[in-house]
Structure formats: C-alpha cells, structure tokens
C-alpha cells in the first residue's frame, strides 16, 4: 500500500533530531540548518510509505525520503545508526560518505 508522509512531519522530525542535547548544537545553528535545507533541499510533496524492519518507527521517514529521491538522483542516507535501517547500499556512515565524496 502506498501512502504519503506529510512535509511538515519530515521537517519536524529533522528539527527534533538536530535539537537533541547529545549533539550540542546551539538553537541558532539548528534554525540556520533547517532554513538552508528548506532553501536548497528538494521538495518532495509526497513519498511512498515503505514497509520494513525499522527498530525505531521515527527513522522510517528518513529512509522513505532518501529512497524516493534515489529514484531520480544518486542519493545517500548518511547515519551513525545503520542498525536502525534496512541494509541497503545507499545507507552509509559519515566515514563511508566521505570516502564516496573523495572518489568523485
């Protein structure tokens, strides 16, 4: 079954993650990053809801957006928590992403 994930939910989730105390990002930095993402990011009005084994249901939206964008452009989901996502060649660690970028 295909459903869509509202944009407002995706933005709220990104803001919530970046605002976590463990990252120690100042509020101004989070606000700036969210603002930049809105201005340079790709607006996906709706994404296909995917079914899979996700230990944290809140992480599903990140995988959905990455896989939707990957249909038209080479896209990666960069995460420090690979265990929260299905094994997929487009789900990479920050170190793996740096290696990918170094090889461009």
Image (spheres, rainbow, N blue to C red):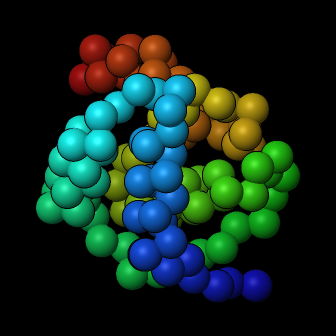
Please identify the quadrant where the N terminus is shown: bottom right
- On the image, the x and y values in percent for residue 98 come to 36, 18
**Residue 61 at what x, y percent from top left?**
58, 61
Please determine whether, in this image, residue 19 is positioned above or below residue 35: above
Q: Residue sitting at 76 percent across and 49 percent down?
A: 56
Q: Nearer the viewer, residue 90 or 65?
A: 65
Quarter of the image containing the C terminus? top left
Q: Nearer the viewer, residue 99 or 45?
A: 45
Q: Is residue 25 left or right of residue 8?
A: left
* Residue at x 34%, y 55% (from the top left corner): 73
Q: Choose top left, top right, bottom left or bottom right for residue 30.
A: top left
Task: Give the camera-side residue of 3 and 100.
Answer: 3
* Res 71 seen here: no
Residue 68 appears at what percent x and percent y? 49, 65
Along the horizontal axis of the image, is 20 left or right of 43?
right
Question: Which residue is painted at 73% across and 39% down in the image?
Answer: 84
- Residue 5 visible, this orientation: yes
Residue 37 image position (x, y, % from top left)? 25, 54
What residue is rendered at 29% in x and 43% in y? 27
88 lies left or right of 23: right
Above or below, 49 relative to 20: below
Query: What is the tally of numbered marks visible in this picture?
Result: 0
Quarter assignment of residue 44: bottom left
């Amino acid at each position: 079954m295909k459903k869509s994930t509202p944009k407002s939910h995706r933005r709220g989730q990104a803001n919530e993650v970046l605002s976590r105390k463990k990252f120690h990002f100042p509020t101004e930095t989070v606000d700036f990053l969210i603002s930049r993402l809105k201005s340079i990011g790709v607006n996906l009005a709706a994404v296909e809801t995917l079914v899979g084994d996700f230990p944290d249901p809140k992480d599903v939206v990140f995988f959905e957006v990455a896989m939707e964008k990957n249909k038209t452009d080479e896209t990666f989901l960069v995460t420090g928590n690979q265990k929260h996502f299905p094994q997929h060649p487009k789900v990479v660690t920050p170190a793996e992403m740096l290696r990918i970028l170094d090889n461009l």
